[in-house]
Image (cartoon, grey):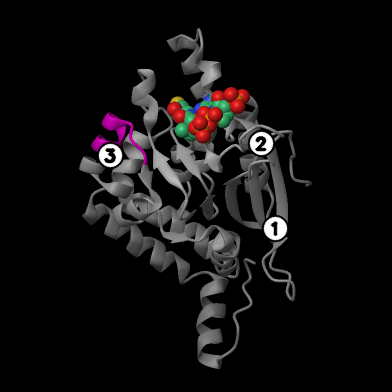
Amino acid sequence: MAAPQSDVLRIEEIAVDDSEDLGSIAFVTIDRPDKLNALNAEVMSSLKDMVSWVENTDSIRVVVITGAQPKEAEEGKRAKPNAFVAGADITEFVGKKSEDIRKMFAENAVEALWNITKPTIAMVDGFALGGGCEVACSCDIRVASDRSRFGTPEINLGLIPGYGATQRLVNLVGYGKTMEMVMTGEMINSADALKWGLVNHVVEPEQLYQFTMDIAKKIGTKSTHTLKVAKQTIRTALSTGLEEGVAIEAEAFASLFDSEDKEIGVSAFIGRHQAKWQHK
Ligand code: COA
C-alpha cells in the first residue's frame, strides 16, 4: 500500500539496510513551515491516515516524525524560525466551544500516534510548543537539535495542554517541572530539556538527521515481534504498580520463549552470526 501523502504531511520510506530486505523507516514530515508546522485540522487528519497506514504496512518498522525546515525568506522579509511544531493552529480556536473541541478529540491524532505499536522517534529541530511538545512526548524517543525549544504556552491563551502533556510530561520530567512548564508557559532550551529528561539526545543541527536515523536503523534491525512486546511491556509501567508491572514483564518474557525469534537470536549469539529474524 502506498504511503498516504497530503499537502501538509509528507512520508518517505527509507530502507533500514540496503543490503538486506529489512523493510523501511517511515520518515514523516509535518509540512506547514510558514505557520511553523502548526497542527491544523488537515495535519491532524493526515497524521491519523499515516498512523493507520503504518499499522497496516508490515514493511514499516520504525516511524520518525519531524517538522519541515523553513523556506528561504522572501525578499525584504525575515526568515521564519526553525520549528518542529509550534502547537495547535491557534487560528482554529476562534469561536470554538467545548462541544466542538470534544468532537475534535473523538478523532484524536496525538492519541493515535501514542498508540502506534511500532517504535516512534521525534526528530526536533526548533520550536516544539504546545501540541508540538505533545506530539514529541507521544513518541517513544526524542532527539533534538541544540537550537530547539520546548514549552507548553497554553496558559497564555487561557488554556491548558489538551493532547496529553499534563500526563505524559509528568512521566518524562516529573511533577514539579511539569507544574512549572504548564503554569509559567515558559520555554526551556534543549540543554535543560536534556537535563530534565524531556529528550534523549541533543546534537548539532547538521548531525540531527544522521544521528536520528542511526537510532531508527539500529532499532529497525531487531525482530518486529520482540519490539512490539517490549513497547507494550514498558507502557505497562505507566499505568500499573511495580508488583503488577513486574509480573506482566515476567509473563511477556516467558511468552517470548515460544517465539521463533528467541531461537534465532540465541543461536545467532552462540554461533556468532547475525540473527535473521522470522519477524523482519
Ligand atoms: N498557530 C497558528 N499559527 C502559528 C502558530 C500557531 N500555534 N505558531 C506560529 N504561527 C504562525 C504565526 O502566526 C506566523 O504566521 P504569519 O507569518 O502568517 O503571520 C508564523 O507562524 C511565524 O510565526 P511568528 O510568530 O511570526 O514567529 P516568531 O519567530 O516571531 O515567534 C513563536 C515564534 C513560536 C515564539 C511564536 O510563533 C509563538 O508563540 N507561537 C505560538 C505558540 C503557542 O502558543 N503554541 C501553543 C498553541 S495551543
Q: Which residue is mark 1?
A: 59
Q: Position of residue 109 (x, y in %)?
A: 55, 33
Q: Nearer the viewer, residue 181 or 112?
A: 181
Q: Nearer the viewer, mark 3 or mark 2?
A: 3
235 drawn magenta: no
The secondary element bearing badge 1 is classed as loop
Residue at horizontal 66 percent and vertical 36 percent from the top: 49
- Kind of residue at badge 1: Ser
Q: Nearer the viewer, residue 70 or 40?
A: 70
Around disc 1, counting alpha carbons within 10 Å, would you say few (fewer than 14), some (14 to 19), or many (20 or more)?
some
Q: Label 3, label 1: how many angstroms apart (C-alpha)?
A: 37 Å
Residue at horizontal 62 percent and vertical 47 percent from the top: 55
Q: Label 1, label 2: how many angstroms apart (C-alpha)?
A: 17 Å
Q: Is residue 52 visible?
A: yes
Q: Nearer the viewer, mark 3 or mark 1?
A: 3
Among numbered discs 1 and 2, the one appearing first in the sequence: 2
Return the mark for residue 178.
Answer: 3
Among numbered discs 3 and 1, the one appearing first in the sequence: 1
Residue found at the very far front of the displayed protein = 76
Instruction: Kindly report the secondary structure that dominates the magenta region of the rendered protein.
Output: helix
Q: Classify the position of the C terminus by image quarter.
A: bottom right
**Taking 133 as reference, is 179 left or right?**
left
Residue found at the very far bottom of the displayed protein = 271
User: Which region shows up in magenta?
Assistant: 179-187
Q: Position of residue 266 (x, y in %)?
A: 50, 82
Q: Position of residue 222 (x, y in %)?
A: 56, 69
- Kind of residue at badge 3: Thr
Q: Which residue is mark 2?
A: 49
